[in-house]
């Protein structure tokens, strides 16, 4: 299957700092990628849809100024958590689906963010 | 709105069969996916249904009834490594998934 790589896998940062998470599609082009967030023992919640060359579409309740998304190329989307707070600590996962028909979405490995 | 329901936890014995049900009410439907997720890891794809009926892939099968808003995942010949969370997800637009809360399956010896 297609490969989606996410980096870093784990990051610890101090409150008030910003953290950037990268999501790359390694063997296909992705005009659209998706960012999810998962709290312990909870399911994945869609945060935003990342669109190459245009603004991201955020789900209701997600602060776009806090979670900055940039999709500058067909293989890379980045999520930047700005002014991080301890409550931002979570598991962040990206996904992308190759092709134009409805196919399975492939997930990155996820990033465990801990804000101290 | 979107609403996807699945049981919280199920326990079964090694070698047995377990069926995980998922019901959904969504404003759009482009297919239903099942993913397996081990703790601390990203989900891995198991199966996909877009038309009514049964899809079989080895020890895993998935069934869909669109008119009833119902799906199930069947795990046969359970192995200890099958202990994980199983996520039902509805695609309501291309690539975009709405997940259920997940069903934790515990396989006992």
Image (cartoon, rainbow, N blue to C red):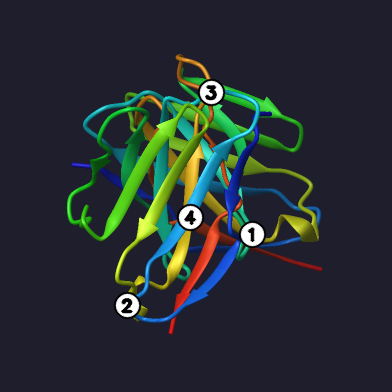
Would residue B80 appear left or right of A89 to someone viewing this image? right
Task: Check if mark 4's residue and mark 1's residue have beta carbons within 8 Å.
Answer: no
Badge 1 crowding class, 10 Å Cα cut-off, few under 14, some 14 to 19, many 20 or more, is some
Labels 4 and 2 in the same subunit? yes
Q: Position of residue B42 (x, y in %)?
A: 59, 53
Q: Which mark is residue A21?
A: 4
Residue occupied by mark 3: A29
> CA–CA distance between discs 3 and 2?
34 Å
Q: Position of residue A83 (x, y in %)?
A: 29, 71
- Numbered disc in front, either 4 or 1: 4
Badge 3 crowding class, 10 Å Cα cut-off, few under 14, some 14 to 19, many 20 or more, is some
Q: To which chain does the residue with label 1 belong?
A: B
Q: Earlier in the sequence, mark 4 or mark 2?
A: 2
- Numbered disc in front, either 1 or 3: 3
Residue occupied by mark 2: A16
* Viewer can see residue B100: no
Query: Depth check: B47 or A56 in front?
Result: A56
Q: Is residue B49 above or below residue A63?
A: above
Residue occupied by mark 1: B38
For label 1, the SS is loop
- Numbered disc in front, either 3 or 2: 2
Q: At 51% across and 57% down in the image, what residue appears?
A: B103
Q: Position of residue A102 (x, y in %)?
A: 45, 20
Badge 2 crowding class, 10 Å Cα cut-off, few under 14, some 14 to 19, many 20 or more, is some
> CA–CA distance between discs 4 and 1?
21 Å
- Numbered disc in front, either 2 or 1: 2
> CA–CA distance between discs 4 and 2?
16 Å
Q: At 68% across and 29% down in the image, what residue appears?
A: A1
For label 2, the SS is loop
Q: To which chain does the residue with label 4 belong?
A: A
The quadrant in which residue A90 appears is bottom left
Q: At 58% across and 67% down in the image, what residue appears?
A: A10
């Amino acid at each position: 299957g297609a490969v989606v790589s996410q980096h870093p896998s784990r990051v610890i940062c101090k409150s008030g700092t910003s953290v950037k998470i990268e999501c790359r599609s390694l063997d296909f082009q992705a005009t659209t990628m998706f960012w999810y967030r998962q709290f312990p023992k909870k399911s994945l919640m869609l945060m935003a849809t990342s669109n190459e060359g245009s603004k991201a579409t955020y789900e209701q309740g997600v602060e776009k100024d806090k979670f900055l998304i940039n999709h500058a190329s067909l293989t890379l989307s980045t999520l930047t958590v700005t002014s991080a707070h301890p409550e931002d600590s979570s598991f962040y996962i990206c996904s992308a689906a190759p092709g134009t028909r409805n196919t399975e979405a492939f997930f990155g490995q996820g990033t465990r963010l801990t804000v101290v | 709105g979107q609403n996807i329901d699945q049981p919280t936890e199920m326990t079964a014995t090694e070698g047995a069969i377990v069926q995980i049900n998922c019901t959904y009410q969504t404003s759009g439907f482009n297919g239903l996916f099942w993913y397996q997720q081990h703790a601390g890891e990203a989900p891995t794809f198991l199966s996909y249904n877009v038309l009514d009926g049964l899809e079989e892939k080895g020890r895993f099968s998935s069934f869909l009834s669109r008119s009833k808003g119902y799906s199930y995942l069947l795990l046969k010949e359970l192995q200890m490594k099958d202990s994980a969370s199983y996520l039902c997800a509805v695609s309501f637009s291309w690539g975009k998934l709405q997940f259920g809360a997940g069903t934790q399956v515990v396989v006992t010896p």
